[in-house]
Image: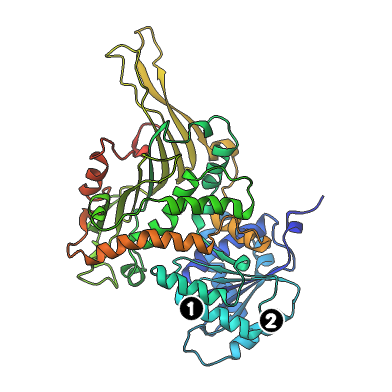
């Protein structure tokens, strides 16, 4: 029987920004876990590229420290020995004004040792370097038909910059070689959303405006901007989370069944949703969106500063750390169904979940006083405690008449599958080597998402008012509650409910 690694081609994974936070916290731990699970071929190499001077041994020591923090008990001596053999370091300066080419030539010589390898160039750098790095690789002769390039978010700052980056990278790599990553699409629960919808006859007939009242998508964080104040103050929650992560989740919830799971069939259906999103512009921005900014409060009982007191944040910043909005999809399946999205930092809990709220029953046969009949809802929890939960009405046990009570059918992934849950990056990094772009964004997807988000950003930029303040540790500004309660609905915080 073949080993798992026999299905993965020999590769060279070149990580630009190889000493940075993303590489140390996510990329290298993900590759190490794949090592432990026997998925990396013996010839696979991991080459870190960064500006600082460093020996291979010094880089390995840096990686050892990172793995000690992020992989826990799985970091055994044998596993480390096998993984460390793959690691090497190349000093290259990817800045656009850099003159030296010596490091690039050494990197090219390293790659030329294995000309038959799949070459993955992972650009964990600032997006304004994506084009220059791609051009340097082209000038080096390092791009082969088996090369791929991975672009980290954010892909630009607006539609024009996204198009410019796509053009610059596209002059060197073909579209089939470009992998624009959104790690949310690699999460197991997101994958199970596809299985839930398209592998079960139960839900798909109900997946439309005929049965669904509304949809809520929440991605909440308890952390502040941490050490990213300089980046975040020029970005904000809409660019950082909504324009990519939340819109991608919305697409997977709303898209029609693709003909197959082919790489472009899924992305074609997502693109249709992005193009059918009702625009939010001009006066609609005032009524359909809320932006907030956290002030000092407490998280887990510990005091935390307000956004304006964070390092590298401008003292008069109007950058939003919270967004709530309402949108609709203008097609036959979803016409009239509102989609409520919210995301923010320093909120009451770290949770990402999708709530499908079904319509109430048309007529109740149960006596008054027997308990309210709550509409059914399906909750897909992406993190933490990943699960899929269907809330139903049942009879309370006992002889006291027909008294109703809400109960949940709960598929807890940890309890059901009793195995380690792979991180999203583990799947996505291997999909790049396989050349499977299904879970990555196509150029037209990225630009359609920016086209929808940009009018909101422009309207906020013209608005002299500051974002609504909210206390750290709460669930955002009161205006976000008013946004949904004007429609006679409320935010469903499933994690705060019994059994949630």
Q: What is the residue that sits farthest to the right in this orientation?
A: 1
Q: Is residue 302 visible to the viewer in this orientation of the structure?
A: no
Above or below: residue 338 compared with residue 182: above
Instruction: Please state if 215 lies on the left or on the right of 410 as rendered.
Output: left
Residue drawn at (34%, 60%), measured in percent from left and top? 237
As helix, strand or loop, the secondary structure at mark 1 comes to: helix
Which of 416 and 254 lies nearest the eye of the viewer?
A: 254
Q: Quadrant of the C terminus?
A: top left
Could you tell me how far apart the alpha carbons at marks 2 and 1 are, in whole angstroms?
Answer: 22 Å
Above or below: residue 304 compared with residue 169: above
Q: What is the residue that sits farthest to the bottom in this orientation?
A: 99
Above or below: residue 152 compared with residue 49: above
Which of 352 and 362 lies nearest the eye of the viewer?
A: 362
As helix, strand or loop, the secondary structure at mark 2 comes to: helix
Q: Residues within 10 Å of mark 1 (few under 14, many from 20)?
A: some
Q: Is residue 212 visible to the viewer in this orientation of the structure?
A: yes
- Give how far across and how far down residue 98 sits, in percent: 49, 89
Residue drawn at (42%, 44%), measured in percent from left and top? 353
Q: Which residue was labeled with disc 2?
A: 110
Instruction: Please state if 14 lies on the left or on the right of 356 as rendered.
Output: right
Q: Earlier in the sequence, mark 2 or mark 1?
A: 2
Res 129 label: 1
Which of 126 and 203 lies nearest the eye of the viewer?
A: 203
- Give how far across and how far down residue 379 sits, in percent: 44, 37
Q: Residues within 10 Å of mark 2 (few under 14, many from 20)?
A: some
Res 272 label: none
Residue drawn at (48%, 84%), measured in percent from left and top? 95
């Amino acid at each position: 029987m073949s080993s798992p690694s026999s299905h993965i081609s020999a590769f060279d994974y070149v990580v630009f920004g190889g000493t940075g936070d993303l590489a140390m916290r996510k990329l290298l731990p993900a590759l190490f876990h794949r090592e432990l699970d026997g998925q990396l071929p013996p010839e696979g190499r991991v080459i870190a590229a960064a500006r600082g001077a460093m020996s291979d041994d010094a880089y390995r020591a840096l990686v050892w420290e990172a793995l000690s923090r992020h992989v826990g008990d799985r970091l055994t001596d044998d596993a480390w020995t096998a993984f460390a053999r793959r690691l090497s370091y190349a000093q290259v300066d990817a800045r656009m004004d850099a003159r030296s080419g010596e490091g690039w030539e050494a990197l090219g010589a390293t790659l030329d040792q294995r000309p038959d390898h799949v070459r993955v160039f992972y650009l964990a750098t600032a997006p304004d370097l994506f084009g220059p790095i791609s051009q340097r690789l082209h000038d080096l002769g390092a791009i082969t038909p088996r090369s791929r390039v991975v672009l980290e978010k954010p892909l630009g700052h607006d539609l024009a910059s996204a198009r410019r980056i796509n053009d610059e990278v596209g002059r060197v790599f073909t579209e089939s070689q470009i992998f624009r990553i959104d790690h949310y699409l690699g999460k197991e629960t997101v994958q199970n959303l596809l299985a839930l919808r398209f592998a079960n006859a139960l839900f798909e007939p109900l997946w439309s405006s005929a049965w669904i009242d509304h949809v809520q998508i929440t991605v909440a964080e308890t952390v502040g901007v941490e050490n990213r104040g300089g980046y975040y103050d020029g970005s904000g929650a809409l660019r950082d989370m909504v324009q990519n992560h939340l819109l991608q989740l919305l697409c997977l919830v709303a898209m029609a069944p693709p003909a197959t799971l082919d790489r472009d069939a899924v992305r074609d259906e997502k693109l249709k949703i992005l193009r059918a999103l009702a625009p939010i512009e001009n006066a609609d921005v005032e009524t359909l969106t809320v932006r907030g900014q956290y002030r000092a409060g407490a998280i887990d009982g510990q005091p935390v500063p307000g956004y304006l007191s964070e390092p590298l944040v401008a003292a008069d910043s109007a950058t939003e750390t919270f967004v709530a909005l309402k949108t609709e999809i203008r097609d036959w399946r979803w016409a009239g169904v509102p989609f409520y999205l919210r995301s923010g930092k320093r909120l009451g809990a770290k949770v990402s979940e999708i709530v499908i709220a079904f319509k109430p029953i048309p007529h109740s046969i149960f006596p008054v006083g027997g308990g309210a009949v709550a509409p059914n809802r399906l909750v897909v929890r992406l993190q933490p405690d990943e699960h899929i939960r269907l809330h139903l009405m049942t009879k309370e046990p006992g002889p006291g008449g027909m008294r109703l009570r809400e109960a949940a059918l709960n598929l807890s992934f940890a309890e059901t599958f009793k195995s380690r849950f792979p991180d999203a990056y583990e799947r996505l990094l291997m999909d790049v080597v396989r050349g499977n772009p299904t879970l990555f964004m196509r150029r037209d997807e990225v630009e359609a998402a920016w086209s929808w988000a940009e009018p909101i950003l422009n309207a906020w930029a013209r608005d002299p008012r500051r974002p609504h303040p909210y206390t750290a540790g709460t669930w955002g500004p009161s205006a976000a509650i008013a946004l949904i309660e004007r429609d006679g609905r409320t935010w469903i915080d499933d994690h705060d409910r019994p059994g949630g």
